[in-house]
Amino acid sequence: MILPKNMAIGMFDSGLGGVSVLAEAIKMLPNESFLYYGDSAHAPYGEKATNEIKKLSIRAADFLMKKGIKALVVACNTATSVAIEDLRKRFSFPVIGMEPALKPAVQIATAGKIIVMATPVTLREEKFLRLLEKYQDQRDIIALPCPGLAELIERGCCSGKEIENYLINLFSPLKRESISTVVLGCTHYSFIKKEVKSMMPSVQVVDGNFGTIKHLEEVLRENNLISSLAWDQRKIECFTSADPEQFMPLYHRLLSQKLGE
């Protein structure tokens, strides 16, 4: 019989973006097992209608629940913004969400503008607007919607001219020298952190992955759910709604890339 604390942690995203969160979790929680679900057949969530995002998020979470999990990480800022409350009402196990790392950005930024890159849906949802209201009197914060960027990364385009040109066009209305910090408010964007940094070498670039997994660890401890397995007994499995022959090679490449950082 599997003890509840030795069950896996479920994690889902609209596609491959959450792999960056999974890599952080593997590094920070080496004795835990993980089941990852990438809903790439319906990616990206970031420009869909709210009701559809809720439906897809519940479907992904139900899939993982049926596999047997002790906690769920919604490794998608858009799904968190839209569906986190519904998911917490639906399940008895802990449900952890993502949010743009505005708090650490405010803490490290002493001057200059803070840019929050995120999907259009994330930036217009009430959850982000409340977060913005909390900090906007402390710093100059600009919300920067990034339509189409998650789709590029979902196809494995994480570097090169296409990403470079996208970023140049995205930041062209802004004075780059006035920017102190860029917040990556979509888990997909963690895969282009180096590209953002190379375009603006003096700018701090932050994402919410570390803070999310730190919070997950705290919640597991509070609920006596820390695994007692040895690291070589854990399992890491991946599932997808898309074609596995297309999804899995990119999943393994991106996971290896992040684990190697």
Image (cartoon, rainbow, N blue to C red):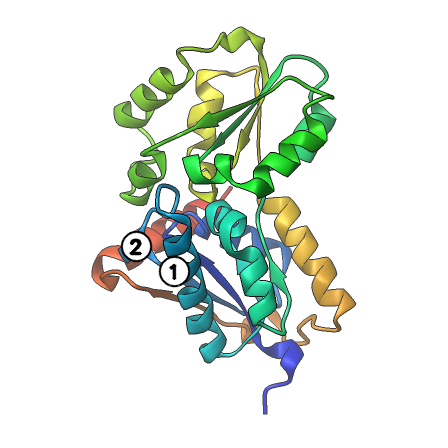
Q: Residues within 10 Å of mark 2 (few under 14, many from 20)?
A: some
The residue under the point 45% across, 20% down is 198
Q: Which residue is drawn at 69% across and 34% down?
A: 103
The quadrant of the picture occupied by the N terminus is: bottom right
Look at mark 2 in the image and give the residue it sits on: 42
Mark 1 → mark 2, Cα distance in angstroms? 8 Å
Left or right of 109, for residue 79: left
Q: Do the CB atoms of the residues marked 1 and 2 lie less than 8 Å apart?
A: yes
* 54 with respect to 165 (left or right): right
Among the 4 quarters of the image, the one containing residue 84? bottom right
* Label 2 secondary element: helix
The residue indicated by pointer 1 is: 56
Residue 159 % position (x, y):
33, 31
Tell me the quarter of the picture where residue 228 sits.
bottom right
Numbered badge on residue 170: none
Circle nearer the N terminus (1, 2): 2
Q: Which residue lies furthest to the bottom in this view?
A: 1
Residue positioned 64% across, 81% down in the render: 4
Position in image of residue 105 (x %, y %)? 66, 29
Q: Can residue 26 be seen in this view?
A: no
Residue 257 makes an appearance in the image: yes
Q: Position of residue 130 (x, y in %)?
A: 64, 37
Q: Which amino acid does label 1 sit on?
A: Leu
